[in-house]
Amino acid sequence: MDSFEKCSRMPAMAQKRVTALIILILGAALGWYLYHSQISGSKPFKLGLDLSGGTQLVYRADTNAINATDVTDSMAALRDTIERRVNLFGVSEPIVQTEHAGALAGSPEERLIVELPGITDTQKAIQLIGQTPVLEFRLLKQGASVPTELSSTTIAAAFEPAAITGKDLTSAQLEFQSSGGLTNEPVVVLHFNSEGSRMFAELTAKNINRNFGIFLDGVPISVPVIRESIPNGTAVISGSFTPDTAKELARNLNYGALPVPIELISTQTVSGTLGEKAVQDGVKAGLWGVAFVGLFMLLWYRLPGLLATLALVLYIFANLLLFKFIPVTLTAAGIAAFILSVGMAVDANVLIFERMKEELKSGKSTKEAIEDGFARAWPSIRDSNISSMITAVILFWFGTSLIKGFALVFGLGVLVSMLTAITVSRTLLMALGINAKHGFTRFLFGSGTTH
């Protein structure tokens, strides 16, 4: 009977050891890949502005001419337009976001924040954003006449708020048309999206014989009279264009006409040297943190602590791999979150090992103590990690870009650490096959000053 039980147990133990060996080999492969990809530059980490260097531009958006109910949509369109604009110039991973500055920051206003990693020439960065024109279509007010001199003041007094803006534009192209006795006059033909086409058709149908001003950066390009409904969503900008100026206008409009005017209010430049030093300091802090956590686990929990340290290294490899492939834009706050998650990654092991110690004291075998230790520590581990994940989700949902980076890295760390603590640590412990009843084996499974 005893020999039969030994034969039936051996394959199970061998399977656990093979699984543990596969985990260790996989961990070594992940570590080699991370090192090789970073050294060769084939798959580098994405670094934020504070680590890679670059320029941050903060703009104030002028939403006075926009209905209050349309401000949110207009700011979203502004963000998308600027993002397309900087992408056309090959800026690596730009970050473009909007922000509402409330009463605590002064008078309420809408802001646009643009981060351009790798660009430390502030004037070049401003040029990338500032060349984008603001396109507006405004109806002349009922009873008003077209002012002889058009300025910001007279435009606001004579024309209604913008009925259609650049956010409704899909494309612009240079064409040559014959009109007013002119042959092959260069004009810019605008094509609107479905919403813009609907609005344009409705507006022209209801306002026949009214002047309809076309403004570019606040300057009137044309103030034609609406003679008939225009249902096809196409408008023509004509004026004193040469072929070159019309072509340039069409090109700039295709880059993205701004739905609202913006004004630069602040700039901040981070040099590449400062960014590199921040990366080095973060890596150094991470290495020291892992070293001290591993040393504590080894001295206090001995053999289980050693296996927990191996699981911690695998956790680090898995997290860094996720950062590369999601990809996660790492900032100084993100590195801080990662270092914090390294310390939290061993929390589950501490709970498990303390439960194991209590089970061994009660007289259970090592195998039973390991199984019961994991089973009884799991509810606490689960609840702790779920509460941390909820916090990370809330921070990510409501936070600014800086907070979002912290929350994403922290949330990923909590999720991966829960998996590595429950699966990797348990597999490695079970693969040992040690019965720590007395002597040296008992010492290896002790903790602190106890045996």
Image: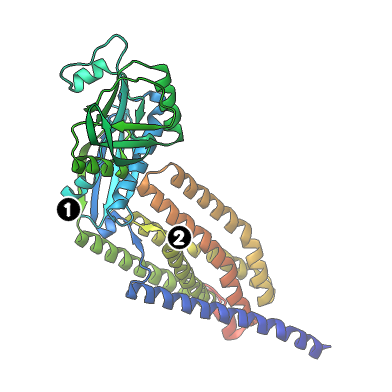
The quadrant the N terminus occupies is: bottom right
Q: Which image quarter is the C terminus in?
A: bottom right
Give the crowd class for mark 2: few <14, some 14-19, many >=20 residues within 10 Å. Answer: few
Numbered tag placed on residue 121 in the rendering: 1
Name the residue at the right extreme.
1
Number of marks in picture: 2
Given the image, on which type of amino acid does mark 2 rest? Ile
Q: Which SS class for mark 2?
A: loop
Question: Would you call the spot at circle 1 few (<14 residues within 10 Å), some (14-19), or many (20 or more)?
Answer: few
Looking at the image, residue 141 lies above or below residue 255? above
Residue identifier under label 2: 326
Left or right of 249 in this view: 46 = right
Q: Quadrant of residue 176?
A: top left
Residue drawn at 33 percent across, 25 percent down? 162
Looking at the image, which residue is at 34% across and 25% down? 66
Q: Position of residue 241 (x, y in %)?
A: 19, 36
Q: Residue furthest top?
A: 143
The kind of secondary structure element at disc 1 is loop
Find out whether the residues at labels 2 and 1 contact each other: C-beta distance under 8 Å.
Answer: no
Q: Quadrant of residue 237?
A: top left
